[in-house]
Every structure is written in C-alpha cells, then in structure tokens.
Amino acid sequence: MQMASAKCVGLRRQGGVVNVIMITVALLFMVLFLLLPLITVFAQAFAGGISGYVASIVDPNTLSAIWLTLIVAAVALVVNVVFGLAASWCLARFRFPGRLALLTVLDLPFSVSPVVAGLMLVLLYGRQGWLGPWLEAHNLKIIFALPGMMIATIFVTLPFIARELIPLMEEQGADEEEAAILLGASGWQMFWRITIPKLRWGLLYGVLLSNARAMGEFGAVSVVSGNILGLTDTMSLDVKALYDGYNIVGSFAVASLLASLALVTLIAKTVLERQFLGRSTKEEVSA
Amino acid sequence: MNDITGINRRAALLTGVAAGLGAVLPSLPRAAQAASKLKLLNVSYDPTRELYAEYDASFAAAWKAKTGDDLAVSVSNGGSGSQARAVISGLEADIVTLALGYDIDAIAKSGLLSADWAKRLPNGSTPYTSTIVFLTRKGNPKGLKDWPDLLKSGVQIVVANPKTSGGARWAFLAAYGWALGAFGGSTQKANDYIRALYKQVPVLDAGSRGATLTFTNRGIGDVLISWEDEAHMAVAKGGAYEIITPAKSILAEPPVAVVDANVDRHKTRAVAEAYLQNLYTPQSQDLLAKYFYRPRDPQALAKYAAQFPKVDLFTIETFGGWQAAQKQFFANGGVFDQIYGG
Amino acid sequence: MSLADSKPGPGLDLGLGWLRRGRTRRHILPGLGLSLGITLFVLSLIVFLPTAAMVGDAATLGVGGLIRLLATSRVLGAFKVSLGCAALAALTSAVFGLLIAWVLVRTRFPFRRLADAMVDLPFALPTSVAGIALSTLYAPNGWLGSWLAPYGIRVSFTVIGVYVALTFVGLPFVVRSVQPVLQDLEAEQEEAAHMLGAGRLQIFSRVIFPAILPSLTAGFAMAFARGLGEYGSVIFISSNKPGVSEIVPLLIVNELEQFDFAGAAAIGTLMLVLSLVILCVIMLLQRLVRSSRHG
C-alpha cells in the first residue's frame, strides 16, 4: 500500500514529457499575456533615456496628478476601512432578514461596469441629476471635482475589504469576542483588543487590494473627471492625456509608476499570504 | 492597564490621521486660490492643446500687465461632444472652445448660455476656420489626390468616430458634400460613396487626436482624414508624412463662447469675454496661423497664403445647418448608423 | 476561560447550529445597530441612490421607448460584441487559467512562486496602463504585432484586440478560483483510480475535472462579468466600430457624449441587470464550491 501510494505521488509529481509541455505552454501564455505588456511599459518609459524619464515625472501636471491620486486613494481608503469593518461585522456576526440580499449587493461594484458606475454618479450628482439643483443651490461641487472622483473611486473599491474580512471572521468564530463581552468588556474594548488584532492581516490584505484598484481606476473616474489638466487628472487619466498630447514617453513614464505600484502590491500581497494568512501553496503530502 | 493605553494609542492615532486629512483636504483648494486670484477654465476640443497652452500664457501675461491681476487659465481637452456633455453635467467652464456649433447649442439648450451665443462675437463667434485634408505616408505611395481616390481598392482610411468627435463630423460632411456635388446632388449616390468610404476604415477612434496617433504612432492606414491643423501638427511633430489638400472641402468653423451661468457665478465675465475677444487681434491671428488654424482676418490669411492652399470650400449650410445635419447623418438611425448594420 | 467552557460548543448541535448560534450571538455581541447603520448609509450614498437615479432616468423612456432603443442595430451589435468577446475571452481564461493553476499546484519548476505572484498582475495593473501596453505591444509596429503582421494577423485595432484585453483582465479570476480547490483535492481518490487501472486522462476527466468544475465555472463567470464591464483597457486596443468591435460600455459613453442621458441610463440599466444575474450565478456556484470543499 505504501509503495503504491509512493508510486502515485510520483505520478502526481512528475509526469515527464506531459508536464514539461504543460509547464511550457502555461509559462508561454503568461509571458505573452502578462510579462510582455509589463516590460513594454518600462521599455517605452525609458525610450528617451533616464533623463527623459525624470523630466516626464517632474512635470508639474504629472506631479499634481500623482498628488491627486494619493489624496483620492487616501480618502477612499479611510471610507473603505470603516465601511469594510462595519459591513463585515454585521454580515459575519449576525443573522438578520435581508442579510443575503445585502451580501449580494455588496458585490455589485465588482461586477458592474466602471462606466456604468460613473454614469450613475453623473445622473445623481450632475447638474441635471436628481441632486443637481440642490447641490448647485448650496454651491457644492461633486461631479468634475475632487468629491466626485472620490465617490467614483470608493464605488469601485467598496467591496474589497469586506470581502476579505467576512470569510476571515466566519472562520475565526466569535468565541473570543463573546467571552470578552461576557467578562464585562465594553463593545469598543472588545473591538480594539480582540476583533482588530485578530483581523489585522486580513485587513491589511484588503487595504492593499483596494488601494491598488483605487490608484489605478480609470473607467469610472474618466466619466466624472472634467480632465482639467493639473486639477482633475489622476495618474491613470494622465496616461491617456499625455498620450493624446503626443507625449508618448511621458505617458509611459506615468504608466510605469502605476505598474511599479502594481508590482509592489503583488510582492506585498505574496508576503502577506505566505507569512500571515497561511495561504501559502500547500506543500504536498510527502510520501 | 497596558491594554488600555493600547486602546488610547490607537484611538489617538486614528484621531491624528483623521485630523491630518481634515487639515490637508480643505487647504488644497485654498492653496490653489491663494496662488492666483482669478481663475478661468477653458473647456476645449481635442487638437487645441498646443494652441491654448501658448495662448493662455501670453493672455495671462497681458492681463496682468493691463489690470495687475494674476490670472490662471486651466484647460480641459477631449472630444468635442464629450466636453460639451461634461459642461452640461456641471463641469464649470467659463469658456467653451469647441469643434462645432452643435455642441455649444446643446449647452445653450441646457440653460447655461443664451441661444444667440453665436451672434456675440464676429464671424458667428468663430475666430478661426479650418478645413478637412488628407495626411498620407511620405511620397503618397497610394497616389491619393482627391476624394474619389480614397475608394481605390486596398486603401485603408483612418478617421475618428463622427458620433463622438467633432473633427470627424466635419470630415464626414466634407466627404459627403464633395460626393453630393460630384454626383449632381443625388443623396443616393452620396450615401453609396460614404458607405464605401467607411467600409475602408479599420479603426474609429473616439477623438481626432486618437485617430492621428493611430495613424502616426501605430502605423495603421494609408491615409488620415482630419483637420488641416491636426495634419500639420503631425508633420511638425516629426514624421514622414505628406499633407494632401483635396480640391473641394468643407469650411470648418470651430466656435467659441462664454458660458453665462458659470462666469456670473465665478464673477469672471470680464476676463472671459476679453479672453475670447483677444483671439481676434492681429497678434492672436498670427498665433492661430502658427498652429495651422486659418485666421479669420483677411490680412493675416493673406500673409500665410503659402501655408494654406486655396480650396473650394462649402459650408455647413449646404446641409441646412447643424441641427438638420445632425438629424440626417449622426442621430440614432441616421446615415452614419445605416453604414454599420443599418 | 471557564465561561467559554460552559458555553455550548459550536460543534454540538449540527442541525440547527447556525440558526441558534446566530440567535445567541445577537444577544451577546454588540454593534449590530452601529455597523449595519454605517453599512447601509455608505451603500445608500455610494450605491443605492446612484442606482436609483439611473434606473429612474431609464424609466422616463417608458417601456416602448426602452424596447425601441435596445432593439436598434447599434445597441444590439454592441451587446453581441460585448457578450461574444467576454464569453470567448472567459473561455480562453478558463482553459489557460486551469492549465496555469494546474502547473502551479501540481508541478515544480524554477520561478514557480514568481509565476504564482504574477498571475495577479491584471488585478493590480490599472486598466489604462494595461490598455496602452497591450495596444503598443500588438500594434503592427509593436514587438508582437510586427511579428504577426506578415501573416496578415492584426490584433490591435480589431475585435481580436478586444478579446486579448478581456482575456488579460479575466485570467486571474479563473486561476484564483480553481487553485485552492485543486490544492484541497485528496490524493486518495486519484490513487484509487490509478490502482484500478485508470490512465492519466481518465483520472483527470473522471475524478479531478468533476471536482473542480464548480470552481472553474465560478471563475469563468467572474471573468465573464469582469469582461462584460471592462472599459479602460479595451478602448485603447479596440477599433471601436459599431457592430464589429464597439463594446457596450463604450456605447454608453458615446450615448452620453451625444447628450442622450436617458439612452445611456437605459443601456446602463440593462448592463446592471446582467451584472446582477451573473452575480447570483456566481454566488450559487461559490456556495457549491464551499459545500463540496468543507461539507
């Protein structure tokens, strides 16, 4: 039996030629579809040499796009963390009527087109939208200004943290939190001392994913940004604006910054998964 | 005890972050305001990036010299229709400088400026004109001289989508107007021509600039149909191209207007009106010619005659004005829609 | 500790477990009101109200107007392109995603972990960057495009470009959906099948494939949903021709740019309904995956 098992594991491990072919095809596909586009970005960004690259980045409009992107992402982050914790707390720890519907709706921003998201915001907050006259009367600018871009970004990133925390909370169970309450802890004490420490890596993971999306969002933001150079151009919009301005190197320079951010995100994500979330690729049963 | 300080630390940290954000965010617009008292937003169409980058700087300097006020002009560029849509939905443009009157009419219809905007400045509020030309690869290898040559077999034509690009609408009408004249006014034959032409279009970019870059940077197509200024700009940006001016084309008149509701709200009417009137001065007409727009001023136009070959030009009135043209050609179910699966 | 011990353990009552646990929790744990309040408030402001505005605007067209609009060849064509490309791209993602998940879990090769991390690139890379990179890469004068051009194959600025972009964005969904299930798969069944004389192909089709099918389908559905709504990467690489390569999100933007707000809202609403349907399918599939993994 042991021998048979060892033989089988052997079969699972090395299938000789077939495996080599499969690995080759899989890697070829990944090189074509993932690696080459990435390399293209950096190759084009440095087509004008290092100095051309640096000159593109320190352009005032580019710098303001970077700054704007950071602001929008920071605000989205705060809202997403608060929302993510609140949503996962009520959805993972309680059962109430309509919970399933809420869980489904939570995923909506993932599956709805970013363009539709932007359109919705225009139809609600735009000058001719439902809230338009009221906003105008109170001199509040939402669309084509910073708040609109923030709302659009929050829309597309809203589910990330909650989606990460809900399964984590369910897996961990509520025993410790219940014990704390029964021992007389207040709600906030329990929250800060038990819930947050238990969730911190999952929370960081969610923050990481939502941040990557927030900084790179294009579709939704493009509908609600007025594309005012230096004022409402985020980095991902700037990629297109620079390209349309015949500034190919500049466009790819900004793109390369965003690509670097994506790479950092991937590395941080991998580290988090391996070190803290126990999601590393399980080593197979050794024979 | 230890834990309790832990809570406090976290709470303090959060409060700190919140306070920090609270302090930074409102200060942003304030910082921008402090830097300049007067702000203007010019919402423009695609090819004018380079023109207004120079014009804004020189106008701001002149305004400062004249009034002592600092002026900061911001620009937003994009497809003409998309820009008008943004203004209608609340992009607070003080000035719109778009590709065609129809788009400013749409803004007027939404109540932001009065319907007679075109009468406020000379020449129907169009400080410059342009026309539609061909841009081919160097040496014009396919021998494309005029509109009928475009239908030669194997010729690939790059042009933007007339549904979204103002320049592409002028291009469509230039081709259609030529066909109407050539086929004795037969709309049937003109429709056939335009259908055959668009069958040879491999890419419909959303904007004029996108189409230019598809032709130049991506190396797609044998000929680009576009604004005269855009074709010159492509050559000026360095590339082996040739500009072919057809014998007959359309007089493209990109209009400008002050957006009443927005300038009144921003209290920028004076500077906004001066900004547009200044486009008609000899100095500005020279600047327009420098960026390959045909000056309105006959003297300036004569000065740059070498740059602007004589073309037999027809106007939008050939089609009964923009409202009628829009309805016949570009509205849902119009001639353009019929080309694709109609 | 003693208190925790005196409580009935979660494993004691299997049948009505979740119900009873839910009820006791509601008694003990605080914060339902606050957390639900925050959740609903944010969702209302960011999701519900805007959705209502769009559906409301679409409704102004009336049923007749809606049908007339949606039945135009341009709208039908865009849906045909979007659905077709998204389905084909999701299918490609499913095939290669399964292959990639398989080699990542079942084989060992140099840089395997790097490859594993790279799978998520389309998640992390902004769509506009992906679009501009892919369109440069596959343009006739690009690295890959110049290679394909002599064979008459054009990718950038054709409908194939749309397909490539959608495959790019859809790939990680399949890999990340299938991978954990493949890891969980018990060796015993495969071994048993092997001992009974089944060949590799037979083991795969009879034992492994049925086990991963729900997760594969869920991954396909997610890739499909994402592809249907994708905009940023597609507009850079597509030729945007009505009925040929014009996708629905682009059509919405085009409608908007022609000042047809109600038309844009109507098409947007139809997209929303489609998303909801796909979402429900994904939920059901994921439930199936979970129950087969843990149950």
Image: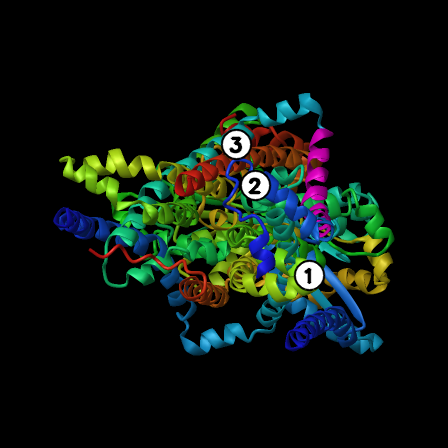
Mark 1 or mark 3: name the one nearer the start of the chain.
3
What residue would you read off at disc 2?
A: C18
Q: Position of residue C219 (x, y in %)?
A: 42, 42
C51 inside magenta stretch: yes
Main SS of residues in magenta? helix
* C-alpha gap between disc 1 and disc 3: 32 Å
Residue positioned 74% across, 47% down in the render: A126
Classify 10 Å Cα crowding around label 1: few (below 14), some (14-19), many (20 and above): few
Tell which subunit mark 2 falls on: C
Check chain identity for marks 1 and 3: say if they share one: yes
Q: Is residue B214 above or below residue C91?
A: below
Residue B299, labelled with which disc?
1
Residue B144 appears left or right of B176: left
Residue for badge 3: B182
Q: Residues within 10 Å of mark 2 (few under 14, many from 20)?
A: few
Residue reaching furthest to the top: C64
Distance between the alpha carbons at the discs numbered 2 and 1:
87 Å
Give the residues drawn in magenta, as a range. C37-60
The numbered mark 1 sits on a residue in which chain?
A: B
**Residue nearest the observer in this picture, C110 or A175:** A175
Residue C245 location (% of width, % of height): 46, 38
Q: Residues within 10 Å of mark 3 (few under 14, many from 20)?
A: some
* Subunit ID for the residue under disc 3: B
Position of B280 with respect to B267 (left or right) is: left
